Image: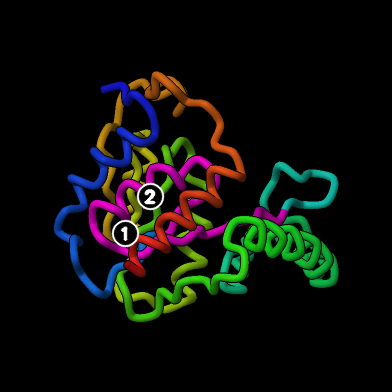
Amino acid sequence: MRFQDRTEAGRILAERLAEYKNRHDVVILALPRGGVPVAYEVAQALNAPLDVFVVRKLGVPGQEELAMGAIASGGVRVINEDVAQLLRIPDEMIEEVAEKEREELERRERLYRGERPGLDARGRVAILIDDGLATGSTMRAAAAAVRGQQPARIVVAAPVAAASTCDQLRSAVDEVVCVETPEPFYAISLWYRDFTQTTDDQVRELLTRGAKSIAA
């Protein structure tokens, strides 16, 4: 199946998550930016609060594409001890990179959320949503980070994903919901007719609309 756009994908994904509808203990956490329009539709269908969950990779200095860890919303930091030990990265260097990325994370959270406080996943069902999962590295970091908030359950959900990625994630979270797992996978964009980049303005608008609908 090819989705028309992220809106349609979100509505279809919501059908797979119907068991969580109208539950007071569910929060929807979207990975920006592409995951937000998908998650917005899910949140509307499930009558659940929506928030962004920002993740920033901690790249090895000089080899920024190699992750030595990640930080995420809520002040959570996850370190890849294997990489840090193998490359003998000193704690001071990790802290320096983390501080830089923390500033960017906070900037993005202010940009997207404004003055609204972030949602607390403690003791609740946290449904993490993106528009697709290729390698799943960002989602794995997000799941590890949200685990630090001590939710009752972590659900990872996406309209389309590589089958191997879904399988790997199942060992890290409580439930994985992938609508389509095409083989061969190649790229997320191939499974959308319209894969136009989501803008910061759209993220802010959807979060504001989501907050208003729950308040109402």
96, 60: nearer the viewer: 96
Mark 1: which amino acid? Val
Give me the disc on residue 143.
none
Residue farthest toward the left in the current orientation of the protein: 19
In the depicted structure, whether residue 48 falls above or below residue 35: below
Q: Quadrant of residue 6?
A: top left
Regarding mark 2 in the picture, which secondary structure is present there? helix
In the depicted structure, whether residue 199 falls above or below residue 2: below
Residue at 68% x, 60% y is 105
Q: Position of residue 215 (x, y in %)?
A: 36, 69
Q: Earlier in the sequence, mark 2 or mark 1?
A: 2
Stretch of the chain drawn in magenta = 29-58
Residue at 35% x, 36% y is 7
Q: Quadrant of residue 94?
A: bottom right
Regarding mark 1 in the picture, which secondary structure is present there? strand
Residue 56 among those drawn in magenta: yes
Mark 2: which amino acid? Tyr
On screen, residue 37 versus residue 138, left or right, reads: left
